[in-house]
Image (cartoon, rainbow, N blue to C red):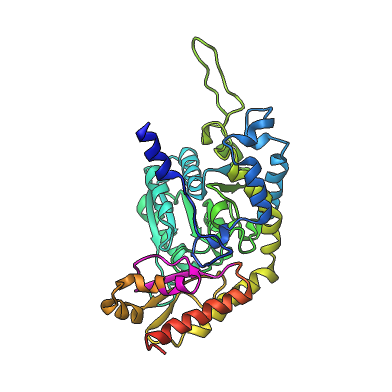
Amino acid sequence: MEYINELVQKYANLTRTINEEFINIHPIQRGGMLTPEAFKALVAYGDGYSLCDNCLKGRIDQIENPPVVEFLKDMAKFLNIDNVMLTAAARESKRLVMEALARKYPKRKTVVIDSLAHYTTYLAIEANNLKLSEVPNSENREFNIEAIDYEKIIKKVQNEDGVLPLLVVLTHVDYKYGNYNDPKPIGEICQKFNIPFLLNAAYSGGILPIDCKEYSADFVVCSGHKSMAASGPIGVLGFNDDFYNDIMVNSKIQGNISSKSFPSKLCTVMGCPPVYGAPLITLMASFPTVVKRTQKEVADEESKKANYVIESIKNIKGIEILGKLPKIHPLTNLKTESFSEVAKTHPRRGFFLRDDFKERGIIGLLPGISKEMKFNTYDLTWEQVKYFTKSFIEIAQKYNLL
């Protein structure tokens, strides 16, 4: 009983700072903030397997009430791709695609990726015992990826392996600098060589407009909890009809004694997508808002907010804006050598910067880091954006950096 009491004390107050009290500028949380509709749905469907109440066919993607079947059709229309499957996360979507293609093209062993790809792209390659070949970036302040370099790397792989690459991956918006990369020229190159093309839209799907047909993308992966206002973890895998039978692989096994079989279950996701309650229902509840906020005029307004902050703080001593400008996606990376110098003599060392922002009601900075700073203004009001900017300038003035 004493042990149970210890557990009660340990886990009784699992709370966090709520958005109404603080402005959260965390680089990978802004796009996943729940809508009011999602909060309401979360309360009703927070229990495990709660979405399975009305499952008649043994698969969550075939549930009609709530309208999961219709939602998947709407999501496919939204991304302008033939089909959509739900997954545990965008990273799982990438792994599944590579697994399916490795079966389809057993002689092809190399995946071509941009050198700013998320670490999960590398792990998906490794998990499937494949090789990788990186497309270089400019390595200057912009870290730009050029389409022509994709073609060079494809030819290099073909020459070295004797076969085409298995897959080409482009990170639509990268996690490090928030750089936007135009998928269209990469898609055209992939069509020229007849190589499957995967667009990693984990940071952009739900933030920026996506049109897979325009990009000639065979696959697209999105993250509900990063960019589609869902509690998660949940991923979206979009794929064209050419690869339907490679992704939607139904079970064929049968018990030799029991004669049990599971023909409705999908081998690719071990039965059906593991998003049985909160992840899927919040993704569905937020979907109308996500569609609205990815319209060009709204996306442009969000870009203006990030560029407003950058323009206002760029003259602070020792601040360097990293990545391509002007910003298209609002995730922003700063090199902050001047704050690093302050940290050397500050009693709180590298934690001082986080403290100063928190005192002003702003959270989301990584603790203990002063050499580099990432933030995201997505979906903040203009009033909040201007307050964050003012606070940034005040902190710089406090340490004589302006």
Q: Position of residue 151 (x, y in %)?
A: 47, 63
Does residue 194 appear in the picture of this structure? Answer: no
Which residue occupies the foreground of this view, 176 or 313?
313
Specify whether residue 116 is painted magenta: no
Residue 110 position within the rendered picture, expressed as x and y whole percent measured from the top left: 40, 50
Residue projecting furthest to the top? 257
Q: Which stretch appears magenta?
A: 356-378
Q: Residue at x 55, y 16 (%)?
A: 260
Q: Quadrant of residue 46?
A: top right
Residue ID at (67%, 34%): 62
Q: Is residue 298 above or below residue 218?
A: below
| Image quarter in which the C terminus is found | bottom left
Q: Is residue 28 above or below residue 221?
A: below
Q: Residue at x 56, y 38 (%)?
A: 273
Quarter occupied by residue 116: bottom left
Q: In front here: 177 or 128?
A: 177
Side of 191 where 340 appears, left or right: left
Residue 324, compared with residue 75, is above or below; it is below
